[in-house]
Image (cartoon, helix red, strand yellow):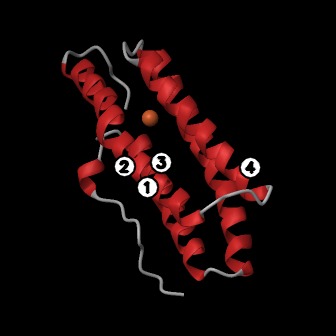
Amino acid sequence: MDDRPLVQWDDRYLTGIQLFDDQHRELIRFTDDLFKACQAGDTQASETFKKTAHAAVEYVKYHFTAEEKMFDNIKYPLAAEHKKQHEVFIKRVLDNVQKFESGGKFVPLAFAQFLREWIFTHIAGHDRQYADFIHSLKRKGLLKTN
Ligand SMILES: [Fe+2]
């Protein structure tokens, strides 16, 4: 299999917060793995897709929990809206994984494309907003930790 990434991290998605930048890179790696699993198009690919999808869901939950804990810590004003975004996304992902497992109408490539689109849009929009908020707290000396 070709090792070149199909879905690639780009530094314009940096939030400037190390922990979340690292986690975002990992999310992109998962999305890339899913894209690759879709490409092979045989039973082996289907197995790979299944395993990767499960690992990706676990990682997404872990990442969202970390972000949401931070929202609570800094009393982020847009927390409710952001958490809602996470919730809707997780639901959609789980619906798809379930469809895949039950042999329902499921198109792996469309799912991988949806993941890619959502993740990049979310990082560039909503995550950028909390990053700006954190940076402004730091500038005002109201937040000392990383
Ligand atoms: Fe987020």
Q: Which residue is mark 3?
A: 23
Report if the CB atoms under discs 2 and 1 are less than 8 Å apart: yes
Q: Nearer the viewer, mark 2 or mark 4?
A: 4
Dot 4 amino acid type: Gln
Q: Which residue is mark 2?
A: 120
Task: Locate residue 34, reporting x and y percent.
Answer: 56, 65
Q: Nearer the viewer, mark 1 or mark 4?
A: 4
Q: Looking at the image, is mark 1 or mark 4 earlier in the sequence? A: 4
Split into 4 quadrants, where in the image is the C terminus? top left
Q: Nearer the viewer, mark 1 or mark 3?
A: 1
Split into 4 quadrants, where in the image is the N terminus? bottom right
Dot 3 amino acid type: Gln
Q: Quadrant of residue 82?
A: top left
Secondary-structure class at tag 1: helix
Dot 2 amino acid type: Phe
Q: Quarter containing ligand 1?
A: top left
Residue 116 disc label = 1
Q: Looking at the image, is mark 4 or mark 3 earlier in the sequence? A: 3
**Crowd class of label 2 (few under 14; some 14 to 19; many from 20; radius 10 Å):** some
Q: Is mark 4 within 8 Å of ligand 1?
A: no
Dot 1 amino acid type: Arg
Q: Residue furthest left?
A: 139
Report if the CB atoms under discs 1 and 3 are less than 8 Å apart: no
Q: Which residue is mark 4?
A: 98
**Mark 1–mark 4 distance (CA, rounded to whole Å):** 19 Å
